Amino acid sequence: MVAFGCNYTIFGMKITLLTERQRARASAWVLPLFENEKPKGRHVWQQLGQPNRRIVDPYFSHDFHAKDNEERLIILPKPPRQLILLGLGKKNVWTLRKLTLLSRRIVRAAKRHRASSLAFHLDDLAVPGIGLPRAAQTVVENLLLADFEFTQYKERPKEGWPKVNSVELITGASREVRDAVAMGKIIGEETNECRRLANTPGSDMTPERLAREAQSQGHGRVRVRILNEAALRKLKMGGILGVSRGSDNRPRFIVMEYRGARRGAAARKPIVLVGKGVTFDSGGLNLKPEQSMQDMHMDMSGAAAVIHGIAAIARLNLPINVVGLIPAVENMPGSAGFRPGDLLKTMSGKTIEVLNTDAEGRIILADALTYAKRYDPSLVLDVATLTGAAMVALGQRATALFATNPKLEATLREVGEVSGDYVWPLPLWSEYEEDIKATFGDVANLGKSRWGGAITAAAFLWQFAKEFPQWAHLDIAPTMTTIEGQELSKGASGVGVRLLVELCRRLAPARRRGGPKR
Ligand code: BES
Ligand code: ZN
Ligand code: ZN
């Protein structure tokens, strides 16, 4: 159970809210300023003290103009010993996206200067048109995201890893802001845990291990069942079994159930989240070349997002029912492995004509989508590192979105924008279904032409999602890893967690959107 102010931390960042009158204890102050703006007298100098002011004041007349990305470190004679000035650029173009990056810059700058405790004013950073609670949530999430480093497999340096242990946020702190901070902390922590799972090497993160990780989530509020190979055979999940045949690491099917809806609530039909859990994708017999294979331990990023999305939803006590389904396999070449030309009989009864063993994600997802039917879901959403083609289409800054209706598409775009997991739509038109017609089976796992690979993959999945009232597919291959300029450490981005939580928050009944359990 997590209560606000309680010190449950995986990564040990303590976040405290202070009012203007309380004195911060941090060893470093961060002063984010808009272009040509001076620190607002009263509140800043009250905290920094007059002796320090004599050192700091001259910076504003000569040296520091608060242009976007400008940064100065000032060493002060009296505590706090460090002052970090950060330029925000022009105030009239301040957005939630910029606040996201700023929050990360704060932590990165602190780590660079080896400041482990920080303080700054939250309310100055408010974004026009967006309430302070949402801004506060964004700040907290991104402070945590920027603090994360995947160090488990490295020798610890003598001086330790640079790390921000405590942040004091000065704010007029309404109750809504407090709740938002608590929520941001949970979401930030779960996103980082998602990154930890995805970054773990393939030899260690096997289907069995992934299943164990899922089992330990949700603070006892998520029911987790693991289906082994025998169970998969009983269910006739020929897709998952087919893809897994080349590997000694045997497949699992992970089922997570969170029942948060209040009794009798209209939202009792669950949302089903499906995550691609390929713990390593060598390509199979259609072996990937060196460059393409290096990141393929992260081919379970969709699974990790579903596991930690549900963990966050449970910790937040959202009043909604959510099911997570994860087919977990390793795609390896092996003498028993599946082959191009194979016809795999899926749980749905449809056969898949395998034309390329590297298009394995859609094959295992087909069985998971069929399994989802037993929940009579109100919405099914899958999250998968499905195609390199989605990266070709969008670059690495947006997840590709496919949805069965315009309203769902609009909701997901908005949720993406607000949560920071940016998505962009591609078409789901019946014309594309022509491209995946098979010769000897029902559906081919490869499009007929080399164009539009992300769309043909979505059209393939659609064949197994026709009975759902609503279905959406997120191809997260483009956003699987962080990129230069995002102010995050290298490796898995944790994409999906923030989006799934924000979506479920919106779909939960309006009056009580949940908050962390007190
Ligand atoms: N896991 C890959 C897709 C991928 C590529 C994810 C890059 C993250 C970064 C997927 O299984 C795959 O190999 N897809 C093939 C499909 C093709 C054979 C139709 C691809 O994109 O090349
Ligand atoms: Zn593949
Ligand atoms: Zn794959």
Image: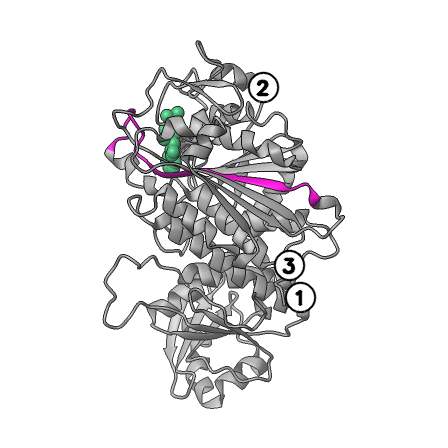
Residue 76, image x and y in percent? Answer: 39, 83
Q: Which residue is mark 2?
A: 430
Residue 90 % position (x, y) = 53, 60
Tell me if residue 263 can be seen. yes
Q: Nearer the viewer, residue 5 or 167?
A: 5
- Residue situated in front as seen by the camera: 457 or 101: 457
- At 34% from the left and 71% from the top, the residue drawn is 113
Residue span colored magenta: 268-289
> Which mark is on residue 440?
none
Q: Amino acid at mark 1?
A: Glu
Question: What residue would you read off at disc 3?
Answer: 128
Instruction: Tell me, for residue 176, which label it has, or none.
Output: 1
Quadrant occupied by the N terminus: bottom right
Q: Is residue 471 magenta?
A: no
User: Is the residue 14 above or below the residue 506 in the image?
Assistant: below
Cα separation, mark 3 vs mark 2, equals 41 Å
